[in-house]
Every structure is written in C-alpha cells, then in structure tokens.
Amino acid sequence: MAAFAAVLTVYHKLDLFLPSSPSKSCPETQSIHVELRSMINALKNYSSMQGRKLRLDPLEQQIEDLAEKITDLMEHEKLNDEEDLTTVPSELIDLVREFTFLSGNFIAEASKIEENKEAPGPRATVSSKMICKSECELVGLEEETKQVMDWVVGGPYTLEGISIVGMVGIGKTTLVEQVYNHPSTMSLYDTRIMVIVGPDFEFNEFLQLLVDHIEGAKRKRFTATSELSAHVRKLLEKRRYLLVLDDVWDYRIWHYMERCFPRSYDKCRIIVTTRLLSVACGAIHVHKKCFLDDDDSWNLLRRTVFTSLEESCSFQLEKIGKKIANNCEGLPLAIISIGRILRDAEKTVEYWEKISEDENPLGIDVDDNSNITRSLLLSYDMLPRYQKACFLYAGVFPRSYVIYVSELIRLWAIEGFVVGKNLVSVGITGEAWLEELISASVVLVHQKSSTFRKTKTCRIHYVFRNLCISIAEKEKFCHVLRKYKYSFPRGTNLQRRLCSHSNSMLGIEEVRATIKSILSIGSLLCLGPYHPYPLRLHLSFTLLKILNARAIRFFTFPCEILKLVRLKYLAITYDGELPNSISQLQKLQVLIIRRHIYTKLSEVAYLPVGIWNLKHLWHLHCLGLDLPEPCNGEMFLHNLKTLSGVSARSCRRRILARLPNLLKLGIRIVLGQDEKQSFGFLNIVGDVHPYLESFKCIVFGFNGCVVLELPSFPRYSRKITLSGCKFPWKFMAAIHNFWDLRVLKLRCNSFCGRVWEPFQGELPRLEYLLLEDLDMEVWKSCSGNFPKLRRIFIRHCYKLREIPIDFGNIESLELIEVEDCHPLIATSAKMIKENHQKMFRYKNLQVLIHSSWEDKK
C-alpha cells in the first residue's frame, strides 16, 4: 500500500516537473515516463491483494525513502520553473532508474505472495437462506420495517428493485429478515428466496441456485448462460416472487437481472442489501439503514446481556451499561458483540466500568479472527489500493475529533496520497476519493456543506478506527499514542508518522526520549485535547513534512521549527510574533497560527514580512495577525488560495493585488467600545477580487453602522457569510441580483431593522439561506425573490412572527428548519409545507422545529 502511494506520487510529480512535449523531452525522460506508467498499471492489477498480508516492509521502506529523495531533488532543481528544459540532471535519472528497479522487485515479490495463497475452494457463500430469529429482532426496526414493507407489499404491479445500504454490522440483513418473514409478505408471494451473495459473485451459480430452489436440486444443470437465463425467465414468468440478495458487491447485478428476469406485472420484488452506495443506486428505491439511537442501543445491549427472566439489571449497572451502549455509536454488531462479552463475564460494577473506559473493548486487531474483525477487514480489503492509505490516515484521528474534509484533503495532498496538475485538481480528486470512501460505508458523513452537494465534516466509526490503528501500526504506516495505553512496540523506530491522542503524554520524559529516537518520522499529528500549559515537544526530525500541533500551546516560538527545511504543513497555537526567519521554510504550503488569548486581538499585530517569500503557500489561517505590506514590487503569493483570520488591515489594495489567485477570504474584526468602522475595505475586496468563491466578514464589538455609501461585495461569489456588521436592510442592495451566489448566511446582527423587503428578482440562484440572531420583525417577500431556494434555516430570531407564506410556491424548496424562535414561525412553516404539497404533489418539503425550552421541559 505504501509502495503504491510512493510510486503514484513520484509519477505525478515527474509528470509535473519533466517536459512532456516531444520537442523538449529527451529519450531518458520519455523512458522514465513509460517505465513509471507501466509500474502503476502493474500495481493497480494487485488492488485486490490484501495489503495486510504483504510482509514487504524493508522493500517498501526503501521505495518510500527513494521517493523522498527524488521529490527533494526535483524541488531543489525547480525544474517546473524552467521554460526551456531540454536536459534532466543525471542524478535524477539515476535515482529514478533505481526507483523503478526496486518497484519492479516489489511487484515481483507481491506476485509470489499472491500466487502462493491458497486457491479458493468451492463457493459456499451463495446458498439458500434459512431464516431464523435474530438477537436484535425488532429493536429499533419498527419504522424502517414499515417503510420497506410499504415498498414490498404496496406500490405498482411491475417488477421493482429495492436497495438497503449501510455500514457493515448496521443491521441490513436483520431488517430484510423482518420483511421476509412478515405475515403479509408470506401470504402475498408464492415464491420467496433469500441468498447470500458476497464479493466472489458468480451470476450463473446464482441462476442455477434459483432453478434448484424452484424445481429441486436434481433437475438438469445448465452449462450455457443463454440456456440458463432463458430457463429462469420461463420459470419466473408466471410467478409472484420475492428475491432477496444479501451482501452484494458488484454494481452490475442490476444489469444481469434485467437481462434474465421477466418484466413481470404481478408485483414482484427484488431486495438487495449492500455496503456500497454504487450498488444500491441501481434500484428504484434506496433505503439507507440508520444507526440505533441511545435508547434502542441500551435496549439491545440489555436484551443481549440479560437473557434469563431471573436476571435483573441494577441501577448502577444500567447507568454504566448505557455508557457502554453509547460507546458503540449505534452499531448493532458492536452492541451484540460487547453484550456477549458482558453476558459471559461476572456482572460487577468494577468490570463494567473497565469496559466503559476501554477504547477497544472488543479487542479489534488485524491479526485476530473474530467475526466482527473479519467483517470489517472485508470492507477494508475491497477498497482500491490507492484509497487504503487515505482511509488509514483518516482512521488514526481520535474518537472525539471532528474531521473537516478540507483539512483532511490538505493533509492527503501533502502526504502525496492525492496528486494533480494544480491545487484545484488536487481538491477535486480528494473530494471524489472521500465520496468513494463514503459510498463504501467506511467513512461516515458528520455534516454536509451548505448546499448539501459536498461533505463538510466526516467521522470514522470507532470499530473501523480501532482496525485502522491496528493496520497502520502493523504496516509501519503510523504509530498512535493513545490515552489509556502507552507502548512503543518493536519496530516503532521505522514508523513514518506519529499521531498523539493524548498530548499530556508528550510531557513524559520516557515518551520524549523514545520519540526522539524515531528518526524516520515525516508527520507529527498532535490531535489530543487542547493542552494550555507549557509542554516541551521534541521537533528535531530532519524528515518532518507535517507538524499539526494546534492542540499544544507554545509560550515561545519553537526555534527548532526553523530547521525543518522539508516542512510543508505547520499548525501551532502561539500568541507572540512569528520570527522573520520563517521564510527559511521554503517548502511551506499550509500555515495555521491559532491564538490562545483572544482578548487582545483588537491590537495591531502583523505577520513578518518574510511571509511573502513563501512562494508555495496555498493556505494561510492566522487568527489575529495581518499580512504586512510587501517591501518591493516583486513580492507575490501566486499560489495562495485561502486567507482567513485576518482583519480589514489585510484588505489594502497593495496587499490584495499581490494575491492574484485568492479563492476564499475570511475577515475577522474586533472593535473597542468607541471605535468606528467605515467598511471601506469591502469596496477594495469587491474591486480587486470580484471572483472570490467564498467571502466571510465577522465583526465583534460594533455599536452601529456609520456607512454612508453602499458597500461593495465580491460580485461573483458563490458564498457570503456576514456577522455583526449591523447594516440597514437597504444595504442588501449591495448583493442584489448576484447571479452566482448560492449560499447566504446572515448571522448575529449582520443586518438590523424591523422590516426586510427583498428586491424583486433578488438572488436568482440562491439555494441556502441562514437567518440567525437578527432583530427583524417583518419579512416581506415573494417566491419570485428566491426561485431556486432549497433550504431555509431560521435560528434565534425571536421577534420574527412569520415566514412569507408564498414560499410554498418555490418548487425547489426541500427543507425549512426553525430553532428557538416564536411559535408563530413554526405555524407558518407548517402552512408553507401544506401549500407546497398541494402545488407539487411529488415533492416532499421537510419542516423541522427545534426548541431548547421544549427539550429541557
């Protein structure tokens, strides 16, 4: 896995650095391209190999080390900056030759391992399914069973396919069993069959199984697919059948069945369960299986542990048991597995407390042979090899860590897992790969973006996290320091990455001494809880590329950082001034500076002028620090895409003009009681960067608007977020008729005034509107103002009494969510839903009402 990522990274970097034009390239470079391309194709052919079984650590280590040397040499020579490159340094050619030789050996060794694996025996996973009662029968399945039953028993009289998709162990099979065994189903269908498919699916074997099930096993066995398909079609033509295919992995299953199954008009149904969204989407109906809530989780655990009527659960055990159930994060397989452990052990408070505090109570490990580990490993093994590194990287994040997709993709890119021609293509590729991991049900969506087209934050279920940590440590991919378990097993000194889940452990002398001896560390991720007290952190790693230490507060700037010449990603918490010598970090691409004390952010503080020498910088977040004006006319940050945390002082024309490719800008302004803000910087931003994708302006401590003229915003922005500006509503004319604006978030007195009456035709493409903490009392509008609106969020607008009723005329409207507002708003939202249903019968407008007062009650 690591070798494949290294080869892929070197190939794409060479593709960027070496000449591709025949007129410029020499025979050596053409040969290098051909050899690397053939190597990648060869490695892709082994995407089905189980990386956990390939014990090629020394060879993979050599490949990774050599890849690092090649990358360093290319960056040192700055080949991509040469306009007329006709020759390639001989040292680079020699390194690439050695690299291709080692990679060829890797492929050969991997081939031997693959060939020596035991050949699979006869397929036993496809068989008739004998239905039995499950341990989790009817626990939290009532609503989902009813929904699936409506599809199975009701609906049109044509053949329909239904998919049930979700993570391994979430209860897809149990849900299908409830439907399969339901009395209504049994009475409706004269032919029912349920088969386990699995990843080694053979369609002919499946068809023969259908024949055997209907006609008996002694009937003629067909060898030709066409004859078998015709016979199955004839058998099913006059039958009302229910067919269940459990655990499907091949998206072509629907195509196969469409060719062989008759288009029956007798209400026949096909149900498919799968872990893959790409498979599920081939059906007419797709049901995403839900996790259990806290109450159902505890009920399932209690039912699994206490099987006898004589047994009872004490109050103390129930309190601890609910915590254990919650730790399982709603996954039935995990709840049942831990329940069996508790059932067979002594039921004492001490033992249950030990289980509740254990981060891996099921003992999930890559080398164990438990049912849950085998199920999890199948999901991992079926991932393409190029995605395994991305998944493992996300899997070593701590349990409580909210993984922002943008941050994760930045780390993937710097690690070399995701590559592309430019930063935009890297981002697109990273998002696509993340969506593929989500589609495979190994990464879970935590929060969607404003437009719901992308994932904003994600998470890894704790069972997968334990598996990822186990694989990462075995494969020398990453070593994890955890809160409850401190160990540096043999071979730790060869780890490429170190991730800390408990930053306080880094203060232990023995830990520091051991970390200091790991010379191969290229990434140091301090992802544990925030540590506000002084902490000595060893940073003298000559190979370090990534340092994420935002959760550790530095009282003085760690000068060791300035010697990390390979550093590309730096994130720290530091209140002082950065040294101008930070310009020595010439490879730096991501710089994140957080402040521990926010009370002094109104004071003027600047980044050192040397920041303008970081030519590769593409993400800069510096809370409370501003960009200084450049010293000369040659200072540009051409690669900078994101700038956030700065104040209006960074919005001078002389500064913004030196950021020609800026896409996202976040302004943060802190004002004293008597200070005034003219917002003149908005005109500069709108003039210099009219094509910003995202613009955010947050103001603190502002008493009122003194703007005499209409402010200007980036005219072609797709997302604008405002807070604390206290503009009068008439200033909404500044964004009137913004054709590309899709997301508008108006927070905390961004606009003030009793009445908001939007202009006719305002914001024609707006899809997402958030109104939060506004003093508005009357909202005058009509459906023509927001013709493409999909989602409305209204939060803490206590004076507002009504949402314009004619919003029910907006066909695209999907969701209205109201939180802690006047009850009359909820009433108007429900009226809008009724009008919407009358006007658009096949649309389902969702209305969600939340009240913290009701929750407390």
Image (cartoon, rainbow, N blue to C red):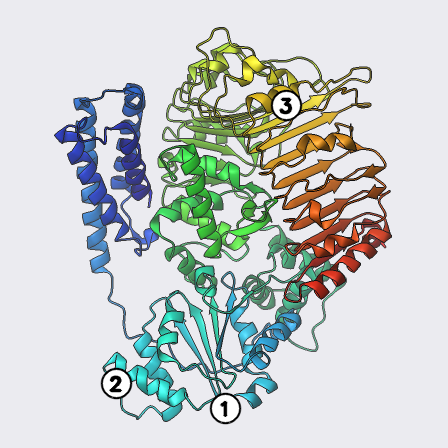
Q: Which of marks 1 and 3 is in front?
A: 1
- Secondary structure, mark 1, is loop
Q: Residue at x 55, y 61 (%)?
A: 334
Q: Distance between the residues labelled 1 and 3?
A: 69 Å
- Secondary structure, mark 2, is loop
Q: Position of residue 702 (x, y in %)?
A: 78, 23
Q: Which of 291 and 154 is in front in this view?
A: 154
* Residue picked out by circle 2: 222
* Residue picked out by circle 3: 595
Q: Which of 820 and 234 is in front in this view?
A: 234
| Between discs 1 and 3, the one toward the N terminus | 1
- Secondary structure, mark 3, is loop
Q: Distance between the residues labelled 1 and 2?
A: 25 Å
Give the quadrant of residue 704. top right
* Residue picked out by circle 1: 190
Position of 15 relative to 295 (above/below): above
The reply, left or right, for residue 125 in relation to residue 283 is left
